[in-house]
């Protein structure tokens, strides 16, 4: 019997078996890795830079390292599968001869790595919430409950996956009839259960900060801006929902087409994990990005002042050559002072509208004042938050008389 001419399943009505040039969706898996993995790596490196620069490494950082390593390993495990277009075909376009034992090993390994990475990433985010929401008793209760839920849930799923899919004594090894028959029954139900749990846990983790942020004493526009920093994770939630729908289809469809559907939700799993790590990194390195923007803005202000001064000086010299030279512009550009996200979530104080004004101030054409550009003072309108800077190495000089 020539297994290379026998399809994995019979085609549905209206379809025919095609082993020559069938449609394959493996490109979607490759694209998900090429696009999302570099973004995750850059975000992780920026977060690591901030934590090392400020010497504020904490438990959440070590947990996220494990999550990032798990996500990168998950992508690395799937690359050999996605590089073979045969695994992205419909089941009736895949010959039985292409089913080899290593494929089942890769599938189980990828499933375990997904659970490990998702668990450490979500626990890292929840631990980070403890650092900034710790004064709130309600927040602490929700966070610790979420940590317990995530850890117990993903460990249980991993144990069940290993128990059902690893060959038992008497199966004869990976890919043999006894092993594959048990895997085919259990894998669909486990995949769907895993998808449901991912959706629930993602939604839980992403919504904890929302209620706290919107109770802060800030303008609505600023509340929305701070909330958006955390709500980037809803992209990951969307991938979880879409993947769960595909897993449900794989579980209930009467026509077996596991490979076609599994490549789709595996590609979504890649995006989900990498965007989840991005969500964990943005609240930390966002402060650095804002610092760079402030410094760039200060540079443009200085150049504008310099050009204006040059034109004004030439006009003055042309009208009167005996006037005393005017003082020059200081070449020092303020770097600004930033504080950590903790200061946003302290108990709000009454805000004086006059004190809430921040920004780059220029006294006149010949004097560029240094200004303390405090990130959280800008958000809260409370300059007192500058007492807890998180980037100690980039503090600018305060204006005279401050």
Image (cartoon, helix red, strand yellow):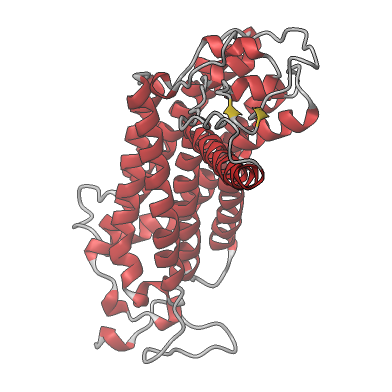
**Residue name at image x 45 percent, y 89 percent:** 17
Rendered image quadrant of residue 115? top left
- How far across and how far down the image is residue 343, in percent? 58, 15
- How far across and how far down the image is residue 199, in percent? 59, 42
Residue at the extreme front: 322
**Residue name at image x 31 percent, y 78 percent:** 96
Q: Nearer the viewer, residue 133 or 375?
A: 375
- How far across and how far down the image is residue 230, in percent? 60, 34
**Residue name at image x 59 percent, y 89 percent:** 14
Against 98, residue 336 (above or below) is above
Rendered image quadrant of residue 361? top right
Relative placement, left or right, of 365 versus 220 is left
Against 397, residue 332 (above or below) is below
Relative placement, left or right, of 266 versus 317 is left
Q: Nearer the viewer, residue 100 or 87?
A: 87
Rendered image quadrant of residue 309? top right
Q: Quadrant of the N terminus?
A: bottom left
Q: Nearer the viewer, residue 372 or 351?
A: 372
Q: Is residue 56 visible?
A: yes
- How far across and how far down the image is residue 174, in percent? 23, 58
Q: Nearer the viewer, residue 175 or 110?
A: 110
């Amino acid at each position: 019997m020539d297994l290379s001419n026998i399809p994995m399943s019979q085609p549905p009505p209206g379809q025919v078996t095609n082993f020559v040039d069938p449609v394959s969706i493996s490109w979607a898996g490759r694209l998900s890795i090429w696009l999302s993995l570099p973004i995750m790596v850059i975000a992780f490196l920026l977060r690591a830079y901030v934590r090392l620069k400020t010497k504020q490494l904490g438990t959440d950082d070590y947990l996220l390292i494990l999550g990032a390593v798990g996500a990168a390993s998950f992508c690395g495990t799937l690359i050999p599968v996605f590089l073979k277009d045969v695994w992205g075909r419909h089941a009736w376009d895949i010959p039985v001869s292409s089913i080899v034992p290593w494929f089942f090993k890769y599938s189980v390994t990828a499933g375990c790595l997904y659970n490990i990475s998702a668990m450490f990433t979500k626990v890292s985010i929840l631990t980070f919430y403890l650092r900034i929401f710790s004064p709130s008793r309600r927040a602490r209760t929700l966070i610790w409950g979420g940590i317990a839920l995530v850890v117990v849930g993903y460990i249980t799923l991993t144990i069940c996956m290993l128990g059902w899919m690893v060959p038992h004594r008497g199966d004869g090894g990976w890919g043999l009839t006894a092993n594959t028959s048990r895997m085919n029954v259990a894998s669909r139900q486990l995949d769907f259960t895993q998808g449901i749990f991912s959706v629930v846990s993602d939604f839980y983790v992403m919504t904890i900060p929302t209620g706290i942020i919107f109770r802060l004493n800030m303008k609505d526009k600023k509340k929305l801006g701070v909330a958006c920093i955390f709500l980037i994770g809803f992209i990951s939630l969307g991938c979880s929902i879409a993947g769960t729908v595909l897993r449900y289809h794989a579980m209930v469809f009467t026509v077996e087409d596991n490979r076609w559907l599994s490549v789709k939700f595996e590609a979504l799993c890649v995006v989900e994990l990498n965007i989840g790590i991005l969500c964990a990194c943005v609240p930390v390195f966002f402060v650095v990005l804002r610092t760079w923007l402030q410094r760039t803005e200060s540079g443009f202000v200085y150049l504008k002042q310099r050009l204006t001064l040059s034109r004004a000086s030439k006009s003055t010299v042309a009208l009167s050559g005996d006037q005393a030279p005017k003082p020059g512009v200081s070449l020092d550009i303020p770097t600004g002072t930033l504080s950590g996200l903790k200061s946003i979530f302290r108990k709000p104080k009454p805000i004086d509208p006059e004190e809430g004004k921040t920004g780059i101030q220029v006294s006149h054409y010949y004097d560029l004042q240094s200004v303390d550009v405090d990130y959280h003072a800008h958000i809260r309108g409370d300059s007192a938050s500058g007492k807890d800077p998180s980037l100690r190495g980039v503090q600018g000089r305060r204006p005279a008389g401050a």
